[in-house]
Amino acid sequence: MAIKAQRGTKDILPKDSYKWTYVENLFREVCSLFGYDEIRTPIFESTDLFKRGVGETTDIVQKEMYSFQDNGGRDITLKPEGTAGAVRAFIENKLYANTQPSKLFYITPCFRYERPQAGRMRQFHQFGVEAFGSESASIDAEVMALAMEFFKRVGLEKLELRINSIGCPKCRNEYNNKLRLYLAEKLDKLCGTCQTRYEKNPLRILDCKNEACQSEIGDAPLMIDNICDGCKDHFEKVKVYLDSMGINYVVDPKIVRGLDYYTKTAFEIISQDIGAQSTVCGGGRYDGLVEQLEGPKTPGIGFAIGVERLLLTLENNDIEIPKEEGTDIFVVTIGEKAEIESFKILKALRSNNISCDKDHVGKSVKAQFKYSDKINAKYTIVLGDDEIEKDLATLKNMQTSEQTEIKLSEIADVLKNMI
Ligand code: ATP
Ligand code: MG
């Protein structure tokens, strides 16, 4: 039996890879417009980094990580998300010593052991940004604006930005107690996962996907109604800045990031059309994370966009991604001398940024023409042994079928002005 790709992984073939290149380029472009620079961190990190940086009570750490021991006995994990690695790199490379904020973006594969379905893979990809070193609500608004600008440029205008505040350790502690009090008598009706969240992270119970849990907690007290004045002020400012940019949003009190080092702003960008996997972007502020990973106290905020879900959303909205034009010129050769000569032509054309190709599998002349047609070449150059002596080739315009003679020695110069 031939070996197959692993469950939850996918080959990105040429029929699709141009879409990836396109959205990647667009993301880079938008990041650059907003003053974000790229960071590339390793695919694998110490398992501890994710335990501490993502959080022991999260689904990711509890059941989704690709962890293993390497031959040196180190505990290693393939990155399940981009933030922890970026924070580690920020600390290790002392980026905090530069003028702040540090505005970074990344494009990375991620690995999570999940049940594969549409928009849920074991290897998937994220575009993300992390902005370190600013406590100000203006950077919260900026990262959201960046994400929305990106979505607008890919052609998705109907996405919904949902924002929430999950408070700070101080007001959340008080709130957690209030929430536990409310949940106490419902505890035995909640799912097993929620029961384990009760002590450590009750906030997470609010975004449980289990319907039964949801119906139990309909009138639970909400974090947003219990945030302290500082957090409230921050949240109001975020809204003012978003309003100023004309960015629509809805406040969704169910968005949580429920770990101590996640603070204040949490947001999601939702697409209505890809069913359960509708979140194309998730983000939020993490003022305690750098310190949690033993860096100097530094605020931060970021988001991650799921690229597979982005592409699915584009498909479901019938948004076509422009395909780069194919090969400009195909060189048909008749005879052995012509074939040797064709390499000179190809080299000259390519040096002049004209895309071109020739046959490599011994196609008949007829088949070479057919192929030139198939790849949508704009022109076919026909080169025969006896024409070489005369420094001539035939140039066929594939659209009009018009044929002209062209001097071999001038081919690149002439075509440069035609393509
Ligand atoms: P979900 O609730 O859908 O599992 P999440 O909260 O685990 O999402 P994040 O950790 O916030 O997701 O990741 C950011 C984005 O990455 C998500 O909004 C989504 O678009 C994408 N994503 C997350 N997990 C997967 C996956 N297994 N396959 C494909 N994309 C994913
Ligand atoms: Mg998940």
Image (cartoon, rainbow, N blue to C red):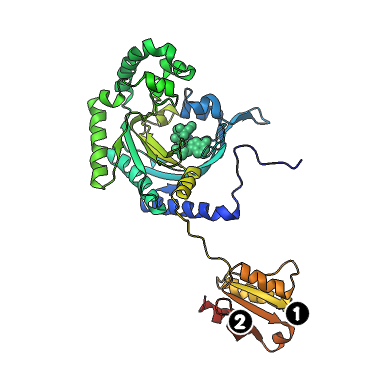
Question: Residue 140 is drawn in which quadrant?
Answer: top left
Nearest to the observer: residue 242 or residue 14: 14
Question: On the image, which quarter does residue 234 sit in?
Answer: top left
Visible residue check, residue 121: yes
Residue 241 position in % (x across, y down)? 25, 43
Number of on-image labels: 2
- Give yes or no for contact between labels 2 and 1 (Cβ–Cβ under 8 Å): no
User: Is residue 82 visible in this depiction of the protein?
Assistant: no
Residue placed most toward the observer, 93 or 109: 109
Which residue corresponds to the image point at 43% horizontal and 20% vertical from the top-left? Answer: 212
Distance between the Cα atoms at labels 2 and 1?
18 Å
Dot 2 alpha-carbon crowd within 10 angstroms: few under 14, some 14 to 19, many 20 or more: many
- On screen, 315 above or below 235? below
- Comparing labels 2 and 1, the label whose residue is closer to the camera: 2
Q: Position of residue 201 (x, y in %)?
A: 41, 20
Q: Residue at x 38, y 21 (%)?
A: 215
Kind of residue at badge 1: Lys
- In the rendered view, does 166 fall on the left or right side of 110? left
Q: Point out which mark residue 337 bears.
A: 1
The answer to which of 65 and 348 lies nearer the viewer is 65
Element carrying mark 2: strand
- Of the two numbered discs 2 and 1 on the same chain, state the one appearing first in sequence: 1
| Quadrant assignment, res 104 | top left
**Above-or-below relation of 9 to 217:** below
Measuring from the top left, give residue 117's x and y in whole percent.
55, 36
The residue that mark 2 highlights is 395
**Mark 1 Cβ and ligand 1 under 8 Å apart:** no
Q: Is residue 350 left or right of residue 54?
A: right
Badge number at residue 197: none
Query: What's under tag 2, amino acid-wise?
Result: Leu
- Mark 2 vs ligand 1: CB below 8 Å: no
State the residue at coordinates (26%, 29%): 231
